[in-house]
Image (spheres, rainbow, N blue to C red):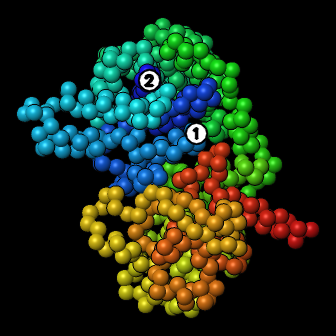
Amino acid sequence: MAEKTVRYIVVLGSLMSGLGKGIVTASIGRILQSKGYSVSPIKFDGYLNVDCGTMNPLRHGEVFVLDDGTECDMDFGTYERFLNESIKGTNSITGGKLFRKVIDKERAGGYLGRDVQIVPHLTDEIKAWIRNVGTESKADFVLVEVGGTVGDLENSYFIEAMRQMGREEGERMLFVQLTYLTALSPGELKTKPTQHANRLITSMGIQPKLILCRGDEPLDKDAREKLSLFCNVSPEDVFDDPSLETIYELPPVLERQKFSSRLLGHFGLKASEEDLKVWSALVSKIKDPKNEINVAISGKYTAVKDAYVSVKEALIHAAAANNTRVHIDWVDTERLEKEEGLKAAELLGKYDGIIVPGGFGSRGVEGKITAIKYCREKQVPYLGLCLGMQLMTVEYARNVAKMAGANSTEMDEKTAYPVIHIMPEQLKVKGMGANMRLGAWECILKKGSLAYAAYSADKCFERHRHRYEVNNELVPKLEEAGLVFSGRSPDGRIVEMAEWKEGWGVGTQAHPELKSRLEAPAPLFMGFVKACLKRQKEKEEKKT
């Protein structure tokens, strides 16, 4: 049987970071899928951390977790949401992983006494890794997003490996340059910075075949022709990557510029008649919905919205599926601790629902507990994620089960009622990296519960990232007080979900936002949005 032909597309950033290489890579993948091709995305990050697990979300953004437990860059969430597929940890490459691999191999005598160097030993490992992903995934295209900006020291060796691989793969490899076009005044796009960036790329032995231009103004004919002339590409291979209402618009926006035809043409392939009609219909539900709801997210890292990007996107997916636009406010409930006289109703009264997502540490916890109490007592739809479920349990213990001073041992090691405590197996853990309860785990759902209704099934598999859990010794007392533990691990040892009977209030130890996609919204977020709409309707009926 002949070996499958794998083609490679490498996306490089130029001029500045933060232009959206992940969204561009995911959009290319989505377009290729619409033409009948299978894709496998790879992300390279130049940092020397082995993974993102020990990084501060305020600096790096969200830590995304895959089914296999890999803690990786938030761009993997973008890939999965666009491609509607789960990705493996081997698709995440970091400088830390590469150097550890090379050093471990050297220590084991794998280089036969050679002096180990960046070229060829490190670059050979990179090329082998990428080709292995192509072989194992059996994909038609492997998409490689190079983190950082061309010219960075951190990714220079990886770009050199891509140059070598481009020479070896020939017509089966294509480079895409993402750039930014500045406009000093309206209608005056400046292409010179992109020209210089392109020269830097070509000086490294790489010739981009397609150029995507970010900017706040439309790409005009003059700018396109200048880039074509000075960057050695056809005018038809220069594409506008405009600012959009929603990131999910980008695939159809590129396709209207005949992107797939040009891309596949460079590989000697023709675009099929398949298109993005279904995808575009989903996008239209985001842009032009019938209903609107207001939701507050009270997280610990709201200063950087990328820290909760999956929560935001999961809300958008569920809202679109319910023909609804969701307005999100990032609310600092720590104010309920600091501002004397401020009541929860004043801070939260205008919202149709409230979410408390994950986080670590004690800062702002008491304010969140006050907000949770408000939701329970006023029957405001509430969704607690990881820490949000733990604090939901603490609130119920204190105010309903009458366990005065109940807390998590993460916040108070000497609490009289440790309703949340560290998982027993975590007591043996040393170090910080990749040793929490990670990845997708099975959860058995209690029939008749809100969770069971949301999933329409007796079990689910959601992704986790935590060290603490509900203390089983105190579960009977909490259940006696009325708290419902609606999800457990198959062996019954770990509480996975909790809910109260006062309205729609559900907490999950998992992070269901990590598996939400535009085409397959997360069930608990769907339940939450429906509850928000129901409460909104009930409030309007009372007014009339």
Q: According to the image, label 1 marks what residue?
A: 82
Q: Amino acid at mark 1?
A: Phe
* Residue at (48, 31) in percent of width and height: 139
Q: Which sits earlier in the primary sequence, circle 1 or circle 2?
A: 2
Q: Amino acid at mark 2?
A: Met
Q: According to the image, label 2 marks what residue?
A: 1
Determine which quarter of the picture holds residue 146.
top left
Q: Give the residue furthest to the top.
A: 229
Q: Report the side of 454 relative to 307 (left or right).
A: right
Quadrant of the snapshot with the N terminus: top left
Marks 1/2: CA–CA distance: 32 Å
Q: In the image, residue 418 lies at what x, y percent?
A: 44, 84
* Residue at (74, 37) in percent of width and height: 281
Q: In the image, residue 176 lies at what x, y percent?
A: 46, 23
Q: How many marks?
A: 2
Could you say whether the residue bearing mark 2 is in a helix, strand or loop? loop
How crowded pointer 1 is (Cα within 10 Å; few <14, some 14-19, many 20+) is rated as: many
Q: Report the side of 276 relative to 411 (left or right).
A: right
Q: Give the residue furthest to the left.
A: 113
Please say whether residue 401 is visible from this viewpoint.
yes
Determine which quarter of the picture holds residue 422.
bottom left
State which mark lies toward you, 1 or 2: 2
Could you say whether the residue bearing mark 1 is in a helix, strand or loop? helix
Q: Which mark is residue 134?
A: none
Observer-nearest of 201 and 348: 201
Observer-nearest of 114 and 295: 114
Observer-nearest of 372 and 320: 320
Q: In the image, residue 443 lies at what x, y percent?
A: 55, 66
* Residue at (61, 18) in percent of width and height: 271
* Residue at (33, 42) in percent of width and height: 94
